[in-house]
Every structure is written in structure tokens, then in C-alpha cells.
Image: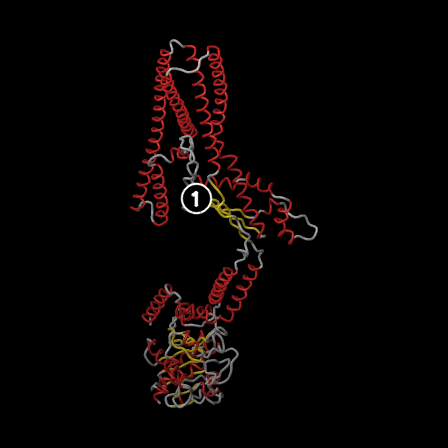
Amino acid sequence: MQDTAQSKASRHSGHDDEVAVERRTLRDYYIIMRERVWVALPLAIVVAVGFFYWQARKTPVYEAVASLQFEKPETVVTSQGVVDTSVRSEIDLNTYIHDIDSNRLRANVIESFTPDERKILQRAAVKRLPQGATPPSAAALLGSIDAEPLRNSYLITITVRNEDPEAAALVANRYVEKFMDYLFESVGGKNEEAVKYLTGRADQLRKDAEDAEKKLQDYMSQHNLVSLDKSIDIVSDRLKSVNTALTNARLEMLSVQELVQQVAEFRKSGKDPLEISYIATHGAVPTLKAQLSDAEQTQSLLMERYLEKHPKVIDNADKIRVTKAELEGAVDMAIADLNTRLAASQDSVRSLEKEYSDQEAQELSLRALSVDYNSLQSRATVAKSYYMEILDRLNQTTTSKNLDKISLHPLDRATVPGSPISPNISAITRTSAGLGVLTFLGIAIGLGFIDDRVKSAWDVESFIGVHLLGIIPQLGAVRNDEKFNLADTDSGSESGNEAFLGLYSSVKIQSKLDFPKSILVTSTIPGEGKTLISCNLAICFARHGKRTLLMDCDLRRPMLHRHFSQQNATGIISWFEQSGELEGDILTNPQLGIVKLADNLWLLTSGGRSKSPTQLLENPIFPQLLERLKRQFDLVVIDSPPMGAVTDSTLIAERTDEVIYVCRFNRASRKHVKLYIRALREGKNEILGIVLNGLSPRRIEYYSNYRYYRSYKKYYGAQT
């Protein structure tokens, strides 16, 4: 007995370990959803339709899009002083994006609206306001404004979303207009200082030229001079050429000095020299910038996929470091080249100044006889030449300033949208459908987890932790007087007969004890079919040659005598109350009244009813009776009260060898069954398993692995 108890405990502990790793399968979840489809489906439809109705009733929003294009301007003048202001990098585009998003531009747009245009902006808001209410200001009704650059292009889109389609197009186009006005006013300001300097210098040279020409004319008039010698003309022409070259060299030096000063200021203030157009476009700088940008984007993608120690990440980081070093070298080379240009221009100016002095001395020597004349004429010519050169330079700088302003133009104006972008019915429909599916799954599976009733093989074997002995189908089509005799080959339905034969086989396989023995059949609550199981199981053992006694120990509500059309005058209670004698032949004891029902099958009724059967069940005479019956019979099948109603079954289980637990489909709670099973195990009872009773053929297919059930009639029907 001790070894048996230890083997039971080991089997129980092993089974508990197995339960700990059980998981629901997809089939279990399919069963859960199938059982609750008519609860979850209406709620899912309500949620989906409600969400669709809520989203579809939102205020319509219209979208208007205007676009701007930045292009490199065509070369109008061949001068190094004309600065290329076209967009060359994302930095330039992002600068324009911030300008568009600035509060200053927003304020300019708001101030530009006319009274009629303000009414268009307020039109949608006025419809929602009560009559007589003050509409919001135009600043609050601009809507959503987004300025974004299109990737790999010089395009900027200005997207406006507003409740009124005409207002959306109006705001988008107005933003384009005011942004262009802003550029015309501000972008050209970088040449203002040069224009101012050249204008003042031109005025001064104009006065000098006029004074020199007047003196020359007065001198020629005074001395009646008409022309000069050809040699003087040649020298004079050469002097002019040198003077022109000197002027250009000085202007070039001025331009280069400005760039050098700008580079110095950027370095002093910590700004990126790449923002200077000359640096950003010099030599290999654009190529290295593009390579660095690609490498940094690649690094970002690699960091999302790999860890920082991954070889690809390390190689790409090395590539970024090398590219940055090369880019810094290219920038330094550009700055060095700029300094070289400055030194070269300074040398050129000094050389030209020296050459000019030499030519001037030569001219003076040629004019020894007409020093005064030639001097006056030279001054007049040089002053005029200076003036013309400065005037030409002023025109070129002014042209450069104007060229800066026309480097962009509107590409597409915003048009009034014909339909709103929100609410998007197709997108709302898809979202509603998805939400409905999620709601259906959530409710069905959620109710499945909340519902604690025994329904499936998973509930029995995985949650409760007991072997599933068998599944008994619904017997609604079988007459009540035949249900308790289905295991008889001469009566009952074929499906029910086959189910009980399968139960008989499962009990034999699960049982570890030899005959003779006693089996207790109990349940959690009344009406789960334990009496039905007891009767048909006893018949199965009797048909297979085992002397079987069917014993009614439901002393509070006995039922076995009715199902076999027997009297209940004698039985366990009457025997206990009268004598409780076990001497002699127990089969012929008149107080017990054991009745033979069929070959190898006997019935021991309760012998009446008792309100307090524990007095009998706890009496030592009761286990003696069971032991005496086991000597007489191979198997004693005991029908007992439900464990959830009274404690009688617990007392009986202490005196029996094995227990079969009956659960009716969708009736008893899993946690209660598990609790009573645990109590039986703590009493060292051998639990053969659970019989799941009352399943329809469809539920047998979906709630168990007994898929052959439906094919039984078809197969054996074909045989007959």
C-alpha cells in the first residue's frame, strides 16, 4: 500500500510538471471563437459601425499644394563678381524651409489678406458658430501649413489643409507670393556694400574726369593745339591698357579680399565654411559631401539592423571618418587656394602699378616739349578711363544683384481641391474592418478565458490536469428508459454504445489495479450524468465477463432502482438500520436485497432515503461491506452524490480503489473540478480520469480529437 501511494504521488507530481508546460493550440482558439461567434460578432459589428460613423462625421479637411522650383540662373555676364546663388545642397533648401515656417512670413501673409479674402477664411467657421457670434481671426483660420523639400530635387511644396477648399488654395498661393517678395527684398542684400562703394567711387571719378577734360580743353584752346604725335598715341594707348589691367586687378583683389574676410569671420564665429558658396563648390568638396551624406545614411540603417561592433558598422564608421578627413582637407585646400589667389592678385597689382609707372615715365620723356599738354591730356584720359571702368563694374554688380533675385519661380499654383482628404472613407472602412476583426477576436478569446466551465479536452487534460477517459454524446434522441442501458448490444443507439465501449477500454487502460476492485463514479453538481455513466459502464464490464455489482450510494436521492424498474424497499440503508450483518451468503441476504439484472450484472439499491447518510458512511461497517462485496464480485461500480453538493462522495472515496469523475459539457466550473480532484488526490485516491458528457456530434468534432465519431455511422452503416 505504501508503494502504491508513492507511485500515485509520483504520477501526480509528474503530471503536474507536464501541465506546467501545456499551451493552447490554434485549434483551441478556433473552438473558442466558434463557440462565441454570436456574442462577439454583433459586438464587433457595433464597434466597427460606430467607429466608421464617428470618423465619417468628422469635419471635412481639404488640401491644396503649391510648389516652388530653384534653378541655376543662366550666365548673363562673364564676370567673376557675379555670385552663383542657385540651390546646391540640402542646407540651402532647409534654410528656405525655415524661412517659410517663420512667424515673420506668417505675419506678412495674414496682413496681406483683403476683407473679402478674410471672409473666405472665416466661411467654414461661421457655419459652425451660433448666429451673431464673432468669428475667429484670420490668424486662427489659416489651417495647417507644411513646407517640405522633395527628395533629390530643387523643389519645395507648400501644403495647406483647411476646412474650406477655396481657403486652402488661397493660403497656399499667398505663402508663395509672400515668400518670393521676401527673397527679392533680402537675398540680394549681400552685394549692397559693393554697390554702395562703387557708386561713390564712380561719382568721384566722374568729377575728376570732367575737371581734367575741362583743363585740357582750356589749355588746347589757349595754345591752339589740335593733335599729338603718333608715338605719343602709341605710348598713351599702352598706358591705357596698363591702367585697365590695373583697375581689373584691383577689383579682383577686392573681391578675393572679401572672400578671405568672409572665411575668417566664419571661422571666428564657429560657422561651417561649407555654407560659403566658393568653398562648397571648390574642387572635390561637393563629391566628398555627397559621399559623407551617403555614408552617414548607410550608418543609420546599419545601426538599426546591427550592433555597433558589427564589421559592417565599423567599416562604414571608418569610411565616414576618412571621408570627413578628406572633406576637411578639401576645405583647407579651397581656403589655401583662395589665399593663393589673393597673393597672386596682390602681386599682379604691384606689377601693374610698376609697369604703369614705367609707361608714364616713358610718356613724359616723349612729351618733353609738350609737358603741360600731355600732362593735361593724360590726366583727362586716365580719369575718364577710371570712370568708365568703375561705371562698368557698377553695372555688373547691379546685374549680379538682380540675378540673385530671379533664381527661383513658382512651379505650380495651388488649385481649389474638389474633394476632402479627410475623412477618407476608404481608409476609414479599412480601419473599421480591422477594428471589427480585433474586437471580434478580443471578445471571443477574452470570453474564452473568462468562461471557467469545462468544455474541451484542453480544459480537462491541460487545466485540470486529469486524463480524459472519454466523451459521451448527447442522447436527446434516445428514450429515457433506454439511456441507462445503452451499453447493451440489444438496445440503444450505435453512437452511444460505441462511446461507452470506448470508455470501457479507456478505463481498463488507465487502471493500474487488478480485479477485484471498486470504482466510484461522482461529479461536481447534480445533472452531469454520473448515474448514466455508472449504469452503462457496469453493463460494459458485465458483457465482457466480469461479475459486476452496480451499487447506489446516493443515499439522499437514489435513482438506480427507477432506471432498472426495481423496488427500493431493501438495500444499504435498510440493511444498516436492521442488523448490518455480513454473515452468510451476501447475495441471498434479504436485508440487502441484491438483484440480478443480467448475466454478470447485479444491482444493490440504497434501500430508501437518508437525510444524514454520513452516520452510515463513517461507520466501520461500511468499508467491511465493500470488502465483502469485492470478495463476491470482480467489480463494484458505486454511483455517488455530486461532490459539490454534499461530502458523501469524499467519505465513500476513502473506501474505494479508483475514481471516475463526470463533467457535463458547459456545466461545471473548471476551478471547482480542479479543487475536488485535488481533494481526491490528497485522499490518496487513484483518479482514472474525467468523462466529458453531453456533447453534440459537432462539438465532439471540434472539442476533442475524436474525429472518427462522425464517420462511425457512415462506415459501419456501409458494412451492414
Frontmost residue, 667 versus 197:
197
* Way the structure is coloured: secondary structure
Left/right of residue 358 with respect to residue 29 in the rendered view: left
Q: Image quadrant for the N terminus? A: bottom left
Asked if 10 appears above or below 287 in the picture, the reply is below
Residue 652: tell me if it is visible. Answer: no
Q: Residue at x 39, y 20 (%)?
A: 240
Left/right of residue 181 with respect to residue 350 in the rendered view: right
Residue 123: tell me if it is visible. Answer: yes
> What number of labels is visible?
1
Q: Position of residue 656 (x, y in %)?
A: 39, 77
Q: Position of residue 488 (x, y in %)?
A: 39, 88
Q: Residue furthest top?
A: 369
Frontmost residue, 434 versus 634:
434
Q: Three-letter amino acid code at disc 1?
A: Tyr
Q: Image quadrant for the C terminus? A: bottom left
Q: Give the class, few, some or many, for how many residues have Cα within 10 Å of label 1's Cα (few <14, many ≥20).
A: many
Q: Name the residue beneath numbered marker 1.
A: 154
Asked if 373 appears above or below 42 in the picture, the reply is above
Q: Position of residue 426 (x, y in %)?
A: 50, 61
